[in-house]
Amino acid sequence: MTSSSSSLLPSTERALLHRIAVGQAEGRAPSLVGAVGRDGRHLWSGGRSCFVDQEPDADTQYRVGSITKTFTAVLVMRLRDEGLLDLGDPLEKHLPGTGVGEVTIAQLLGHSAGLAAESPPPWWERTPGTVRPELRDVLGDQPLLHPVGRRHHYSNPGYTLLGSLVEAVRGEPWEVVLRQEILEPLGMHRTSAQPQEPHAGGWAVHPWADVLMPEPAQDLGLMAPAGQLWSTASDLCRFGALLADGDERVLSADSAREMRTPSAPPESGEWESGYGLGLQLVHRDGRTLIGHSGSLPGFVACLLVSVEEGVIGVALANATSGPLTAAVAGDLVRIVADAEPRFPEPWRPMPAVDESLLELAGPWYWGTHAFGLKVVADRGLELHPLTGKGLGARFLPQEVGAGWVGLDGYFAGETLTVQRRLDGAVDHLDVGSFVFTREPYDPAADVPGGVDARGWRGLPQ
């Protein structure tokens, strides 16, 4: 067994290594490697193998299957951020002649385009990409199985289309664009479309006997954007940091946040949570994790990230089935986050005081619902219910005099404005047409429907 760590407690390191050992043994994996990253750096890795003197480490390549889709999604988001396309654009606008041009780019990213899950036979994962030289060979005669935009239905051909879209807009092969725009800027030198030594070999493990059979490693051709990549535990920790916090060399923090926003509910039983734009969203152990799983004959893989806690978990194994890499990756996150919770940043006051905002701070009422409005950095506002769960959001300032726009929650995208009386005093807040007053149904404020002139009263005798 191999392991390495930089700054973890011995007890935490042992718990991580134990989880890798259990995952390899119970999953009957020829080898399994795991890694943990935190706050943008590789923190720990460990591996276990059935082959003597061939234990993997964080630099050993494994095939990562559908984790490739998240890389393709980042490339598409970069095109959007550069203004070269809009996520609401129909595919036909940029990639004509596919026969499914009415589907939008966003629907392809979130698997709600109605496309079939797989390409026509033979099984694309075990046959060379030369069998499918054109997009029509990938899509088949009936590419749309469901109404467009009505349900989540995971689609490998959908990501072939997105890879072809990247090629059409950039004028370069998908693999070249990937290397130039993601792998090189992030220093992911051990991630590639073809295996590079040292790499694990793919194996099938007999379900009813402890014997092995080698699996073929096919070049997927046009299907490459859906599952081609080989990577390492260390490199995937770097990629996980991008998904959590963004990196201005590759993708902004705002676009990374958009990718992990749910786009469509999953099919029943598919995942515990949902799917964003190229990202699986998973509820596990009381926390929300983002990332992606992956599999191809001979390999299973998973990358999961707790954005709130800044912890990244990676698990890679070289068996067609058996090792529960998603469970292992999630447990690696849990072990570190629970045993060594992140220290919060020291509280510091804002550098300057805006008196016009301070007068807005404090309690507000939507009808009889009590809310608190807090002033935060950069003239931002936070509006949250004072009891229980309910409507709320963070707000960012727009141009002077244009109010604030909701960033998340119920009021995402809605505008908050301050309505004043003739003497300049604040009358109420308007949030997406909802009126918030300083007192419940303030008789002095402009409340829709008015306020009973007799005011509040007790129970009549």
Image (spheres, rainbow, N blue to C red):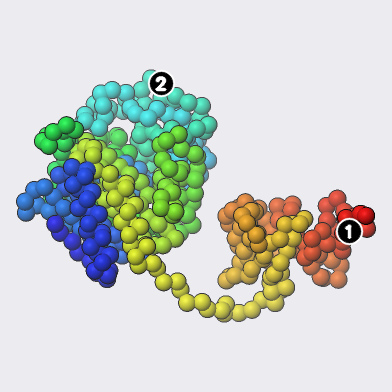
Q: Residues within 10 Å of mark 2 (few under 14, many from 20)?
A: few
Residue 134: image quadrant is: top left
> In what quadrant of the picture does the N terminus appear?
bottom left
Tag 1's secondary structure?
loop
Where residue 287 appears, as percent x and y from the top left, is: 44, 54
Residue 36 located left or right of residue 278: left
CB under 8 Å between discs 2 and 1:
no
Q: Which disc, if any, is residue 142?
A: 2
In-front residue for pair 358/333: 333
The amino acid type found where label 2 is placed reads Gln
Q: Which residue is mark 1?
A: 457
For the view shown, which residue lies furthest in the front direction?
461
Q: Above or below — where is 146 with respect to 82?
A: above
- Which residue is located at x 39 percent, y 33 percent? 155
Q: Which quadrant is home to the C terminus? A: bottom right
- Residue 421 lies, in percent from the top left, at 84, 66
Compared with residue 359, is residue 446 higher up or lower down, i.e. above or below? Answer: above
Q: Earlier in the sequence, mark 2 or mark 1?
A: 2
Q: Residue at x 49, y 39 (%)?
A: 265
In front of the other: 158 or 151: 151
- Percent x, y for residue 88? 53, 40
Real-space Cα separation, disc 2 to disc 1, in angstroms: 67 Å
Q: Residue at x 86, y 67 (%)?
A: 422
Q: Is residue 376 above or below residue 273?
A: below
Quadrant in the rendering for residue 405: bottom right
